[in-house]
Amino acid sequence: MTAAEISRIAGVTRATVSNWRRRHDDFPAPSAGTETSPLYDLPAVQAWLRGRGHTSTASPTEELRTALRLLGPGSGVTARLFPLVAAASRRTPKELAELAALPDDQLTARAEKTAGELPVAVPEAEPFRYGPDDAGVLRALLGCVREAGAQAAVDVLAERELDEGAASGVYQTPEGLALLMARLLPAGASRVLDPACGSGTLLAAAARQGAQELFGQDSLPVQGRRTAVRLLLAAPEAETAIRVGDSLRADAFPDITVDAVLCNPPFADRDWGHDELAYDPRWAYGLPPRFESELAWVQHALAHLEPGGHAVMLLPPALAFRSSGRRVRAELIRSGALRAVVSLPARAAYPLHIGLQIWVFQRPEPGGTDRTTVLFVDGEGEQRDGAAGTPSATDTTTAGAGTRGGSRPRRSGSSSSAASAPASSASAASFDWAGLTDRVLAQWAAFTTAPDTYADEPGVARAVPLVDLLDDVVDVTPARHVRATAADIDPDTLARRVHDLHEQLAEQVAALAAASASGGWQPSGASAREWRTATVSDLARGGALTVLRAATPSTRGSKGPAAPTGENRPVLTAQDISAANPPSAGAVDLHADATQSVAAGDVLVRAVAGGGDAAAMTRVADDQDTGALLGPHIHLLRPDPARLDPWFLAGFLGAEDNIASASTGSSLVHVTPGRLRVPLLPLEEQRRYGEAFRRVYELRAAVRRTADLAADTAATLTTGLTAGVLLPPDTPDNDSA
């Protein structure tokens, strides 16, 4: 293990670890690595720390990773642990604690018995046999299930097994995206297939929408196990069939047709079987070109649908216009199989550098109604420019080569493993999926209810006649077809809107000027102040605050209290913290076990950082937040007001250096709240700092509101001028002319 890993286990800085090495002769010597990058024996370090009373501050998932690392590569224990996770999820926290407290021999015997009680076999799982050397990892696994949830434990196991095997890693479909795709299916879709099921996110989303029979296949055994356990956790009443194998070359369900298909297939796979599958009967719309593997997955999905059934697939944007796929695209359009294309903003899901697209298909019914239009929804333009903006060209970069079975390549050795991420990225975690979902579903519902009378929405959506798409290019990129502005804008209405925006902007600029006033900021003296600090874990142990961690999507399916049925309370999201907004989501966007309410004075900390946005990592809840449910990816700290000022706490916790020292990962940064540090100051002094931090927060919020209003005003003026409904204002030069 590295010095950085030692610092995470001990809850100290890397500088402290360096001091230990220099000052203590009995500190374990490096066992591997180089002089500049030494590696240490993990058991020796743990023994040394225990001998000096250093308790671990690592999260339950980090504890499980550490225990797995102790076993070394090639142990194979991870495959045998998947069934135990599913079985352990059915036990209460008290039962899990009692099981973990047993002596080693009793623990392994009880673990075998517990895993053997699982009624459904996990694909290609090893026999449930555990030896004496497995006791440590069994305790860590039970602790992870008890504290972080069963799904979090599953993700850590998958991450470890992928690191041990030949696969380079996987990226999960973001929860919000999976739910959007599942909600595009018609109500009553009971039998759902995902032929590249990956981690099972899409099938779990389908189960949430009422699907009762779930079929999945993946080429990686670890992904098959992962999906099987995930569905046992998320949909215990559903009938599931998960298989391992290459869906295109060795379809595990050749004789099954379903109501719906959900799929996020691998992109740009040149080894998908073009030559050996050239005469496959699935290619009803034309032989997929050698470099268009996505069109093979599309036709595989359509072949598994009942007549009238729907398929919703996540696909790269280049598929919409590449010349090699033009003939197959044309046949999909001509037959009426393609119903809609929705573009997503870049960074909403992996690969982050392009905006992916959702394609909706429906298998034609013999003698069914002829379809005359295709719906295009420009979610990318909506996110990028707002209603008045002008969409730019879609990024034409193709995705990198993928592996079969829903896997995505990632950089070798990356410290940010997407296998363990709650969503695919920090961007996906904070992305406004609720807003995008509402916009897309509103257009889809209007289009499917009355396609012949569907009214276009400028800048958002448009229904395009098939004949207009069947040209020499057959380009189905939404930005090419969605009109940016309406043709019938009323000049007087737009002029009044511009006047109102100018007035609001003037008021906001004045508010910004007031918030940015100097206010008597003074230097601290000849040098910076120094103070003693304590970690959040220390403060929690001393009763100065309570740490409540929000349940994340990765814990769905674990035991926990359910939200009251039909409750419609607002939900505070991580994006609300970043944008200084009131709670913006609804309870329908939460998973069932998120019931933690927010109270005024609570300190909210985003659980995932990224993009250099450390200044917006924290916030103090106020009256408008009171009673809201705590959304995913947020840590909640409830300070004792007699001992800690909340604004003082939020200000120091949100410092960039503090966040960096308490985080793990690189591109995807997870914040461990217990490792954040706070100065030990008298309450009166805390309040002075707290008032200053509150003013800084108000300044940041005013800057954001001013920037949003300025962008809205500029976009509206540009629209008015280019649409011919506004005239340039008179100037002295114009008058003289």
Image (tube, rainbow, N blue to C red):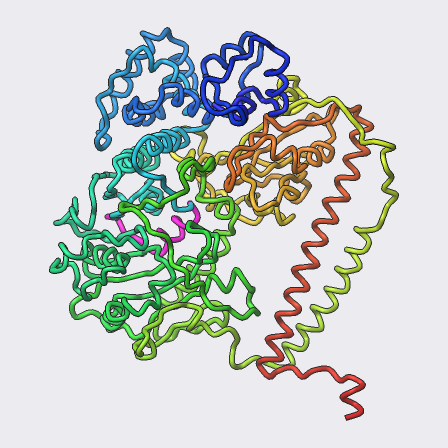
Say if residue 541 shows up in the picture: yes
Closest to the observer: 480 or 621?
480
Say if residue 241 shows up in the picture: no
Closest to the observer: 625 or 677?
677
Name the spot of residue 468 as percent of width and height, x first: 34, 79
Name the spot of residue 217 as percent of width and height, x first: 23, 43
As drawn, 468 above or below 638: below
Q: In the image, 367: left or right of 353? A: left
Quarter placement of the C terminus: bottom right
Is 202 in the magenta? no
Q: In the image, 288: left or right of 621? A: left
Q: Residue at x 38, y 61 (%)?
A: 317
Is 182 in the magenta? yes
Q: Residue furthest bottom?
A: 737
Name the spot of residue 68 as percent of width and height, x first: 38, 22
Q: Residue furthest front?
A: 35
Q: In the image, 574: left or right of 370? A: right
Q: Which residues are magenta?
A: 175-192
As drawn, 524 above or below 185: above
Closest to the observer: 501 or 533?
533
- In this figure, what is the number of numbered marks? 0
Quadrant in the rendering for residue 395:
bottom left
Name the spot of residue 367 as percent of width and height, x first: 16, 70
Q: Residue at x 23, y 28 (%)?
A: 125
Q: Residue at x 36, y 39 (%)?
A: 169
Quadrant in the rendering for residue 66:
top left
